[in-house]
Image (cartoon, helix red, strand yellow):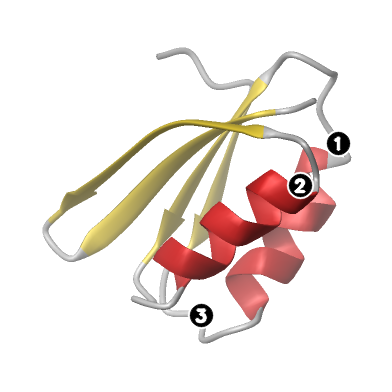
Amino acid sequence: MEAAKVLDAKGMACPMPVVKTKKAIEEIDSGEILEVHATDKGAKSDLTAWTQSGDHELVEQTEEDDVLKFWIKKA
């Protein structure tokens, strides 16, 4: 999946991954993908809720080696 931007939020505690994601998504165009990497387990529910509340689309989410990866399509 081709991301327009990759956000490294590893090592950040709640609410920083969401705060950084909000800022990063403003820097890409509608329809583009933001790839987010986080290690905070709470990011899974936080980013899912934030994505829905902003009418964005959570295209995919995976976890490898304790890193949560999210692909968010900007509304």
Per the model, the C-alpha gap separating discs 2 and 1 is 5 Å
Contact between labelled residues 3 and 2, with CB atoms less than 8 Å apart? no
Disc 3 target residue:
12
Q: Quadrant of residue 20?
A: bottom right
Per the model, the C-alpha gap separating discs 1 and 3 is 20 Å
Q: Earlier in the sequence, mark 2 or mark 3?
A: 3
Disc 2 target residue:
24
- Tell me, for residue 36, which label it has, or none: none
21 shown above or below 11: above
Disc 1 target residue:
27
Amino acid at dot 3: Met
Coordinates of residue 25 in the picture (x, y in percent): 78, 41
Residue at 70% over, 17% down: 32
Contact between labelled residues 1 and 2, with CB atoms less than 8 Å apart? yes
Q: Would residue 70 appear left or right of 53 to someone viewing this image?
A: left
Residue at 67% over, 46% down: 52
Residue at 26% over, 60% down: 67
Q: Earlier in the sequence, mark 1 or mark 3?
A: 3
Contact between labelled residues 3 and 1, with CB atoms less than 8 Å apart? no
Coordinates of residue 27 in the picture (x, y in percent): 86, 36
Crowding around mark 1 (Cα neighbors within 10 Å: few <14, some 14 to 19, many 20+) is: few
Q: Quadrant of residue 68?
A: bottom left
33 shown above or below 40: above
Q: Tag 1's secondary structure?
A: loop
Which of 32/44 is in front? Answer: 44
11 shown above or below 71: below
